[in-house]
């Protein structure tokens, strides 16, 4: 119960999350090469920052998916209290995502 594999990803969210993560993977490879080549530090930092932003977007998609599937399901089953506790825990992983400057 609670933490574990996602058993109910919506196709659209899975597709979006997969695409973004694969883009991040390619981007990370590029940043590794930049460090390998000893590129100018701020240039590397800019790319790392962009990566963080990309990953935060992935977490936002996962949060949306979780609310639309697992949370809704739990509420329908009358497990509201339990799922709210879990959701509050989940929000600790999305502090950058749930702020006012994100969409
Ligand atoms: Cu979920």
Image (cartoon, rainbow, N blue to C red):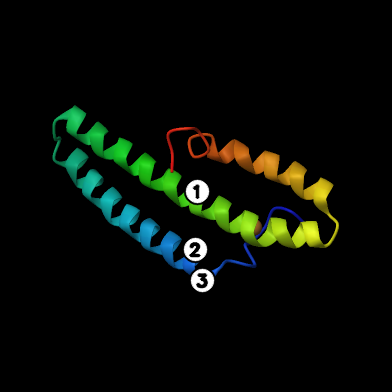
Q: Are marks 2 and 1 in contact (CB under 8 Å)?
A: no
**Exactly how many numbered labels are in the figure?**
3
In the rendered structure, the answer to whether residue 11 lies left or right of residue 5 reads left
Distance from disc 1 to disc 3, alpha carbons, whole Å, reads 16 Å
Secondary structure, mark 2, is helix
Q: Are marks 3 and 2 in contact (CB under 8 Å)?
A: yes
- Indicate the position of residue 59 as horizontal and vertical percent values: 50, 48
- Neighbor class of circle 1 (other Cα within 10 Å; few <14, some 14-19, many 20+) is many
Per the rendering, the mark at residue 60 is 1
Distance from disc 2 to disc 1, alpha carbons, whole Å, reads 10 Å
- Residue at 61 percent across and 39 percent down: it is 91
Residue that mark 3 sits on? 11
Distance from disc 3 to disc 2, alpha carbons, whole Å, reads 6 Å
- Residue at 77 percent across and 58 percent down: it is 74
For residue 9, what is the image quadrant?
bottom right
- Neighbor class of circle 3 (other Cα within 10 Å; few <14, some 14-19, many 20+) is few
Residue that mark 2 sits on? 13
User: Along the line of sight, which residue is nearer the eye, 37 or 1?
Assistant: 1
- Indicate if the residue with disc 1 has its beta carbon within 8 Å of ligand 1: no
Question: What is the quadrant of the N terminus in the image?
Answer: bottom right
- Indicate the position of residue 4 as horizontal and vertical percent values: 67, 57
Q: Residue furthest top?
A: 42
40 versus 91 height, above or below: above
Q: Earlier in the sequence, mark 1 or mark 3?
A: 3
């Amino acid at each position: 119960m609670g933490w574990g594999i996602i058993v109910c990803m919506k196709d659209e969210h899975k597709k979006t999350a997969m695409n973004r993560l694969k883009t991040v993977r390619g981007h990370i490879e590029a940043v590794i090469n930049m460090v390998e080549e000893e590129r100018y530090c701020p240039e590397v930092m800019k790319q790392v920052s962009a990566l963080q932003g990309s990953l935060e977007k992935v977490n936002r998609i996962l949060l949306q998916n979780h609310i639309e599937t697992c949370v809704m399901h739990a509420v329908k089953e009358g497990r509201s209290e339990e799922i709210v506790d879990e959701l509050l825990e989940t929000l600790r992983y999305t502090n950058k995502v749930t702020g006012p400057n994100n969409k």
